[in-house]
Image: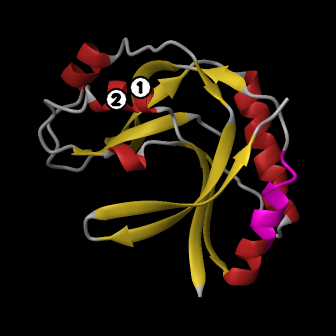
Amino acid sequence: MSHRLFVGIRPPPPIRDMLIDRMEALDGARWQDDDQLHVTLRFVGEVDARQADDLVAALASVHGDPFPLSLAGIGHFERKGRAHTLWAGLGESEALRQLQSRVEMACRRAGLAPETRKFAPHITIARLNGGTAPIGPWISEHGDLASQPWIVDGFTLFESHLSAAGALYEPVRRYALTR
């Protein structure tokens, strides 16, 4: 049996509420729901049960101190000149980059191929398609998004279940960051 996995950070409820409060007034956007809001540290993809077990064990070796993180701005990703994703940005954080690097090394120790994409920390808030209204006005209205810092005290290995209603994310194991 295969498992579709990723490693991420779940923001606390007040941060997720702040994001959900902005999810309106853009016709055609497929807004993420509360259970989908996360920062991806590493997309793993499809792996078999043995490799999933190896990854669970390798991630247990990732250590670091809790650190602050905050929301900072709104943006979008494009493909072939067309926006396909709206995201909430994060404040600059060397600790987040270090955690992502440690997670990447654990994935490699578990036998996964190296990630080739540059780490672009964000929280996806909407998926867009050709029927979505122009995003410029929405980004202008919400682009100053900012939050007070919250403390990241751990990360989670998630399994992603794809369905017609969208992806469902099931926590497999949470890993604490401790001093």
Which label is found at residue 149? Answer: none
* Mark 2–mark 1 CB contact (< 8 Å): yes
Mark 2 sits on what residue? 17
Q: Main secondary structure of the magenta part?
A: helix
Q: Amino acid at mark 1?
A: Pro
Viewed as shown, does residue 9 lie left or right of 99? left
User: Which span of residues is magenta-colored?
Assistant: 54-62
Residue in the foreground of this view, choosing between 136 and 94:
94
Q: Is residue 89 visible?
A: yes
Q: How far across and how far down the image is residue 113, in percent?
A: 77, 65
Residue in the foreground of this view, choosing between 178 and 137:
178
Q: Amino acid at mark 2?
A: Asp
Write the residue at 59% across / 82% down. Answer: 2
Q: CA distance from mark 2 to mark 1?
A: 5 Å
Residue in the foreground of this view, choosing between 17 and 42:
17
Q: How far across and how far down the image is residue 61, in percent?
A: 87, 52
Viewed as shown, does residue 144 lie left or right of 152? left
Q: Secondary structure at mark 2?
A: helix
